[in-house]
Image: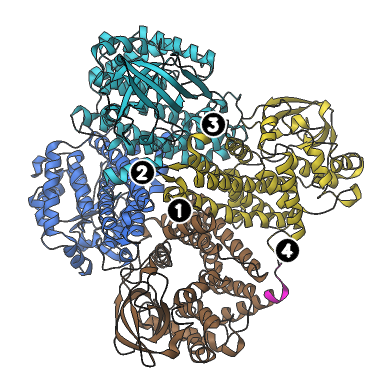
Chain colours: A brown, B cyan, C blue, D yellow
Amino acid sequence: MDLTEPAEVAAFRSEAREWLRSHVPSTPLPSLDTEAGFAAHREWEREMFEARWAVVTWPAEYGGRDAGLLEWLAFEEEYWAAGAPVRVSQNGIFLLAPTIFEFGTKEQKDRFLAPMGRADEVWAQGWSEPGAGSDLASLRSKADRVDGGWRLSGQKTWSTRGAYADWMFGLFRSDPSSERHRGLTYLLFPLSADGVTVRPIRQLDGEPGFAEVFLDDVFVPDDNVLGGVGEGWKVAMSTTTSERGLTLRSPGRFMAAADRLVDLYTATDGSDPAAAAAARDDVVQAWMDADAYRLYVLGTALKAIDGLPIGAESSANKLFWSTLDVEIHETAFAMLGERATLEADPVAGPWLDGYEFSLAGPIYAGTNEVQRNVVAERVLGLPR
Amino acid sequence: MDLTEPAEVAAFRSEAREWLRSHVPSTPLPSLDTEAGFAAHREWEREMFEARWAVVTWPAEYGGRDAGLLEWLAFEEEYWAAGAPVRVSQNGIFLLAPTIFEFGTKEQKDRFLAPMGRADEVWAQGWSEPGAGSDLASLRSKADRVDGGWRLSGQKTWSTRGAYADWMFGLFRSDPSSERHRGLTYLLFPLSADGVTVRPIRQLDGEPGFAEVFLDDVFVPDDNVLGGVGEGWKVAMSTTTSERGLTLRSPGRFMAAADRLVDLYTATDGSDPAAAAAARDDVVQAWMDADAYRLYVLGTALKAIDGLPIGAESSANKLFWSTLDVEIHETAFAMLGERATLEADPVAGPWLDGYEFSLAGPIYAGTNEVQRNVVAERVLGLPR
Amino acid sequence: MRLAPDADALEFAAGVRELLADVADPAALRVAWDDPDGRIPGVWKHLAETGVLGLTVPEEYGGAGADLTSLLPVLVETGRAALPEPVVETIVAATLLAQSGGELAEEWLPKIVAGDATVATGLGPGRVVSAAPWADLLIVPDHADLLCAVARADVDLVDEVSVDRGVRLASVSVSEGAGVALGGLDLEGGFDLGAVAVAAQLLGLAEAMLDMSVRYAGQREQFGVAIGSFQAIKHQLADVFVANSFAAPVVARAAWSVAQGAPTRTRDASHAKHAATLAARRAARTALQVHAGIGYTFEHDLHMWMKRTWTLSSLWGTAAWHRERVSQALLDASRPT
Amino acid sequence: MRLAPDADALEFAAGVRELLADVADPAALRVAWDDPDGRIPGVWKHLAETGVLGLTVPEEYGGAGADLTSLLPVLVETGRAALPEPVVETIVAATLLAQSGGELAEEWLPKIVAGDATVATGLGPGRVVSAAPWADLLIVPDHADLLCAVARADVDLVDEVSVDRGVRLASVSVSEGAGVALGGLDLEGGFDLGAVAVAAQLLGLAEAMLDMSVRYAGQREQFGVAIGSFQAIKHQLADVFVANSFAAPVVARAAWSVAQGAPTRTRDASHAKHAATLAARRAARTALQVHAGIGYTFEHDLHMWMKRTWTLSSLWGTAAWHRERVSQALLDASRPT
């Protein structure tokens, strides 16, 4: 066993820290889910991309630094510790890009990656449908074969960033006779295309954080098929079971939140010792859990580097971080007392945003109920 | 609303308290699940019965005091607060007796009640079978019709008190062609009967707290059929959904345990303040829950007195008290630190016994998983 | 002996429930949420006419002179409806005004009974005053931190915008010399009254969120069946039902203790606020999990109930604050102090 | 960089696992439980021969000079087997003896390596000394409460009978003048070593109880299907798997911190004991609930694993004690003291 950070990783970490210290906006950007905020977050992504910090794990030719998993984890820790903005291009760089690297053609890589990294093209995902949430395989939006491509019709929903995004990636039923996981194709198309109607959905905080997307005979050329026709399910799932599944929820984010919780405890201990005392055990539990998550992901990353399979981890992972995130924010909520729900409060406001955001964790990307089934059946081998 | 205890209940309470103060054994009796302990507990029951405190809710003609539900609740509070012994005749007086009162013939009442109340005849229940636990309706032990009665064959298990009891009541499949809840008959028979083999089962604490009972062609006369032939399920269930369902787990017991937990906290606060401080929130939570259980049962009793139906309560009730009992003892366990597992420790020993006992709560009388189904389906009306 | 509200109290509450279903349905709530004022036009008058606002006001001031136990089921209904009206604040204020008597009572209590006045109160551990922006009169700590009654015009309000648009909160400062000092009031009793009243509202919220969830779980289909047929959903909802069922009698007992001024009043009141808060927060978390995506939207009604739960769990003392208050009564009483 | 044990450590542990499956199976455990001595004849020698007892003993004393990170997977195996042998106590004692050096080390360490001696240690917050009745040598507080090494013959033991028959506990008093005082030892380091070693055993217990439960849930049928097909069972077991999975790296990191004497050693060790205790207790509660009646019997093996979990969660500092130790390191560090 050896937990000393390799010299090159430590060097990478301090270089990232240096750059972030001098570039992270001193005042928080406006909400990502407002037009102004979205634009501001695009700007920030561009600034990072120009400095080659936007997509550190990508090859240099696409604007990255060929960073390994350890460097990536170090970068994420530094990024969130620095209080840097949330990533407007997250769906693209963490969900789609790995898939393009694995299944994309040279042309697709050249066409899509750089604009994605610069956030010139922000991507929204098109997985869920009104009738296909937890039961994703029941999706019905279809892609009809036409000369030179496909015509899409149907409806997608819960499309994060959908309100302001430029492009969408998603799964469509390309074989009308197919059922469940078969006969699906992974397609890419601009939300500006003819026949696309985007209806923003206001989320808990009142901002249009996601959208419904109505597709009426939308043409998509063959060039925009990612992976094989009818291979959509395999293509979509591969990234979640590869080590890249990790990059969806980086430990750095929760560790930074847990450290802020400790700061809140210290401050509360000065202003309202009784409130701090009542929260003491929860604060330390949340911090320990964030630390455990950090170690668990590190261990998984090290396994991946050794070339070991890690599919099983991703469901346990999701159950843990989504519970942890709520736990951190519930604890802050309790300590904040009567100010907990005050949106404009300089201290409480950000915690409230974080709380609302955390409540989505146990729901999206497969509800925790579905994840428990996956762990029980695929990991523990209990009967279906 | 009016929460002042009626004068007659208060009077009944103080009379009970008086008697208990002067009669409860000063030193705890040996374990109920040892031969000596079983005998000692029989003696205690006899002493109570002679003083007409054993079965206060029964009619005077059978040795009771015709006490109402409020008197009974008051008696139970006083009984457990006084640290009186556990009830060796519990299965009989709380499970079987209500059924006899509701379905028994005059002859059956005259034959069985008084000896049950005096604990001259201690009853064991014969519900579960190796293949029929949570799924009780799948039981297969059968009663074959013969001249003048029935012949039993099959196997019962988890029969509490079975190791030392005198008689057994249980359900048997009297209609060989029947399935599930139909064709069952409620029968009473002595464990000394020919063809009965009792194999004690050692429970968690190593003592034979329950038994397997093997039945090989055991004759039971028609007089010992309780309720109608083939009516067994209805007869067995009726008592659990009537207000008598309450009498299975009296609040007094948990309130007394919670009060002892507070005493343990106070003592620990003197000897090991850090351990007390760490348990403080759990102690008060456990006490509040015991108090809530007391109030809930009181409210249910008052509804029953008003003649309102209370079937729904019994499952919620079981979920709550079984969780509460474990919670109380887990909290004590944590405060007791390194002494928690020491059987002979004068302080820790009884808490350890109580902990082991509490762990059976979420399992017997319908596992809590089954109870949650009942609440969800029968109370909330969710689809099966 | 009776732990449940009396028949007439239940009947009265049923009437209020019908009234609110009629004049304060979710559509009306949405309008109020988007409205700068944040109240539902006319509802306050309706509540006065049905006798809600005067129920606990002494008869000499035109009220019905009832105690909290009679009002309790009504408070549950205002919670069930997530009603954005300052019922609790006004009831507490009325109780304090009746105690103080004199001209203040003469002037304000009849107005309260008639629904012509809204009064806000700032009691307990907090500093944020609920309903202050709506209030004609405020009962708050004055410049010297002694409780006073002061007109809206004589205080500086700093709005504290809550994520729950159905309440209006503010920090209040009373300019020196303003306000009429109020002496000889049972402030702790007033606070306990408010805490139990809010606990009753939390119960109503919890029951409403459970009902919403059960209804949705019975309709929403995934994997070819209603999601309510999955044990994963059933058991979460069963646990919510249990938590609600065991919080209810605790709140009822606390109302009795407040009404009787029982020696255990503060402990019972804190137990009630604690139990109701935990039940409502569990109901909210579970409701969101059962509704999933749709419940996370602003379009769906759930968020209004969820956010009211958040506000009421933060005001009138948090669950942790009340738990510690019970601890002190229960665990530290015996200690030498 | 590596968080998992090295390949050779894993291979070594696999060997020990096979050994224990062979010589310390549940049947052998039952015999030991009923035996007044409480140990499994021959196992101690076997452990010595395979090199377990000498693994962390310096080479100069005939050991392999490895650190805790190499021993960790072996400790997990001793937990998985619910082994009733004083491995942890002896390892900790050996570490302290090696620190003290001199004649004591010369005399006892080779015996420990050879499996000819059992040593018990009494460190940390507790007063009960585990394995004392088995020990040839005890390292315990002396008459003046300073740590000393003392022969079994020179102490008074009061047996403290545990519900877990696989351990032997006692209160120990050293008669005045007896024992060799031990100076200059890193007692806190020794305690942290023991806490992490026990945490590793708790992990093994948790994994074993999860495996038992999964196996049983796949076989036991009710309502016509295996109970493992019910979400109510699936989700409880999934939560156990998650808790175990996230406790494991915390324990591994703590072993590294202990081996390196890292500045965060005490915090990491306490985090490990806390996390492993919670995981194992959850695994025990769930295993009993899944096994239901049969798991509640003395005939079934589960109770031996469950009770070992209870003992190890109570010894070497309770979860609450360790959580508070982390709190002090994490939350109070910044405070002026």
Quarter of the picture containing the C terminus of chain A is bottom left
Q: Is residue B48 above or below residue A89?
A: above
Residue extending farthest top: B50
Q: Of residues A109 and C37, which is closer to you in this image?
A: A109
- State which chain disc 3 sits on: D
The dot on residue D154 is none
Q: Is residue B342 above or below residue D208?
A: above
- Indicate whether residue C269 is drawn in magenta: no
The answer for how far apart the CA atoms under marks 3 and 4 are is 44 Å
Cβ atoms under marks 4 and 2 closer than 8 Å: no
- Give, as a three-letter code, the residue at label 3: Thr
In the picture of the structure, the residue carrying the numbered disc 3 is D297
The dot on residue A2 is 4
- Give, as a three-letter code, the residue at label 2: Arg
The quadrant in which residue A50 appears is bottom right
In the picture of the structure, the residue carrying the numbered disc 1 is A272
The answer for how far apart the CA atoms under marks 4 and 1 are is 42 Å
Left or right of residue B328, residue C198 in this image: left
- State which chain disc 4 sits on: A
Residue C74 lies, in percent from the top left, at 18, 46
The dot on residue B372 is 2
The answer for how far apart the CA atoms under marks 1 and 3 are is 50 Å
Q: From which residue to which does the magenta span run?
A: A1-9
Q: Are marks 4 and 1 on the same chain?
A: yes
Left or right of residue D182, residue A25 in this image: left
Q: Are marks 4 and 2 on the same chain?
A: no
